[in-house]
Image (spheres, helix red, strand yellow):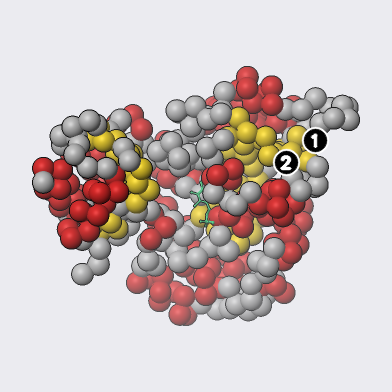
């Protein structure tokens, strides 16, 4: 029996329809620009996000670093939040791969960096002491704070701030379509002010591999070259892009189901003794479960005790852990998960 795997939405297998499309995909050498399935995916993604061009990349991390290195040169600086994915989980790659300095601004509980602090972090021009602020990076949804949606007005204000100071805006939209589903604001409107965007096909959208970068024609032309330098020039990648097309067109339309399941799961778990859930934080497909003094177990112990119930949870800290809903977490799993937690917490 397959586990009820709440560790992340990255654990999603491709759907049967994706596997069929992958088997039958027309392909060519994408480094020559000759893979029709990759070309179709890139065009559809760019059109959907209201940008001129798109680029298929191996992963979200590759999309972010390829964007950063296309915008920035050695001695340039990016500004990003201290708890965002780029500054926390991407191996410090702006520094190691690009000689790009990272300036961090503290993230607020709502997932934003305060505009005044962001403005203060931008380096004044014409001073020989400073690196050059070239890029501001936002993350939507914001993962480490709970899959929070950044308000569209805030994103636009950051875009204006960047552009008024000669910098660019990159959006790490690994879960951009979750933000769109939760806010009711089309994805293209959420990235209107951005000069580049990355989003993942391989998380809640169920594709086995791949992310997309979008931006202007000129930006993507340069990014293609950078992708090659990063070892991301793939050959018959249409095998992967075929799943990506289904991810983009179909899986983006059903994410609200994951959000409803997350909400119902959070409401049920929040009633159990020893568990506290801030419902204002449950906006998309993530639930941060906080353990109170009443709990006899740590997050890691609870994770261990859930395994015999065929349930996997991840990112455990002594007093918190995370559960993520996705395509393979079905409606009928929700009461089953709540019951398993009830048994474990009472044991
Ligand atoms: C998962 C994730 C990435 C990186 O994607 P990979 O495909 O795992 O490299 C980047 N940013 C955010 C916010 C993510 O959640």
Relative to 302, does residue 22 appear above or below in the rendering?
below
Query: Would you call the spot at circle 2 few (<14 residues within 10 Å), some (14-19), or many (20 or more)?
Result: many
Q: Residue at x 57, y 32 (%)?
A: 155
**Residue 306 point in image, percent of width and height:** 21, 54
- Asked if the residue at label 1 sits under 8 Å from ligand 1, the reply is no
**Residue 125 point in image, percent of width and height:** 84, 27
Q: Secondary structure at mark 2?
A: strand
Please indicate, yes or no, whether residue 218 appears anywhere in the rendered image: yes
Pointer 1 and pointer 2: residues touching (CB < 8 Å)? yes
Query: Would you call the spot at circle 1 few (<14 residues within 10 Å), some (14-19), or many (20 or more)?
Result: many
**Residue 223 point in image, percent of width and height:** 72, 56
Distance from disc 1 to disc 2, alpha carbons, whole Å, reads: 8 Å
- Asked if the residue at label 2 sits under 8 Å from ligand 1, the reply is no
**Of 38 and 325, the residue lying toward us:** 325
Q: Residue furthest top?
A: 116
**Residue 334 point in image, percent of width and height:** 19, 49
On the picture, is 149 further left or further right than 329? right
Q: Which residue is mark 1?
A: 131
Please indicate, yes or no, whether residue 335 appears anywhere in the rendered image: no
Relative to 38, does residue 86 appear above or below in the rendering?
above
Q: Quadrant of the N terminus?
A: bottom left
Q: Residue at x 70, y 72 (%)?
A: 31
Q: Secondary structure at mark 1?
A: loop
Q: Residue at x 68, y 42 (%)?
A: 195
Q: Which residue is mark 2?
A: 101
Relative to 194, does residue 120 appear above or below in the rendering?
above
């Amino acid at each position: 029996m397959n586990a009820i795997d709440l560790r992340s939405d990255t654990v999603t297998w491709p759907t049967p329809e994706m596997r069929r499309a992958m088997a039958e995909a027309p392909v060519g050498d994408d480094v020559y620009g000759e893979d029709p399935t990759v070309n179709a995916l890139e065009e559809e993604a760019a059109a959907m996000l209201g940008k001129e061009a798109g680029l298929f990349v191996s992963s979200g991390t590759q999309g972010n670093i390829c964007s950063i290195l296309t915008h920035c040169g050695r001695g340039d600086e990016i500004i990003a939040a201290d708890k965002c994915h780029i500054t926390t989980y991407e191996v410090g790659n702006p520094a190691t791969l690009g000689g790009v300095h990272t300036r961090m601004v503290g993230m607020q509980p709502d997932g934003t960096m305060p505009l005044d602090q962001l403005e203060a972090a931008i380096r004044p021009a014409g001073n020989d002491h400073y690196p050059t602020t070239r890029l501001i990076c936002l993350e939507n949804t914001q993962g480490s704070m709970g899959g929070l949606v950044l308000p569209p007005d805030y994103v636009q204000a950051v875009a204006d701030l960047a552009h008024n100071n000669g910098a660019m805006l990159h959006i790490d939209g690994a879960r951009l379509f979750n933000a769109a589903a939760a806010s009711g604001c089309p994805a293209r409107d959420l990235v209107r002010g951005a000069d580049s965007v990355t989003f993942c096909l391989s998380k809640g959208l169920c594709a086995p591999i791949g992310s997309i970068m979008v931006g202007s024609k000129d930006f993507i032309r340069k990014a293609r070259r950078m992708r090659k330098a990063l070892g991301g020039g793939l050959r018959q990648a249409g095998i992967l892009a075929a799943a990506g097309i289904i991810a983009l067109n179909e899986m983006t339309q059903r994410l609200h189901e994951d959000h409803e399941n997350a909400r119902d799961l959070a409401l049920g778990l929040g009633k159990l003794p020893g568990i506290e859930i801030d419902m204002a934080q449950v906006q998309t497909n993530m639930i941060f479960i906080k353990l109170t003094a009443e709990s006899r177990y740590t997050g890691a112990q609870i994770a261990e005790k859930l395994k015999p119930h065929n349930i996997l949870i991840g990112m455990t800290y002594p007093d918190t852990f995370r559960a993520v809903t996705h395509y393979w977490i079905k409606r009928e799993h929700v009461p089953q998960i709540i019951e398993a937690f009830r048994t474990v917490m009472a044991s």
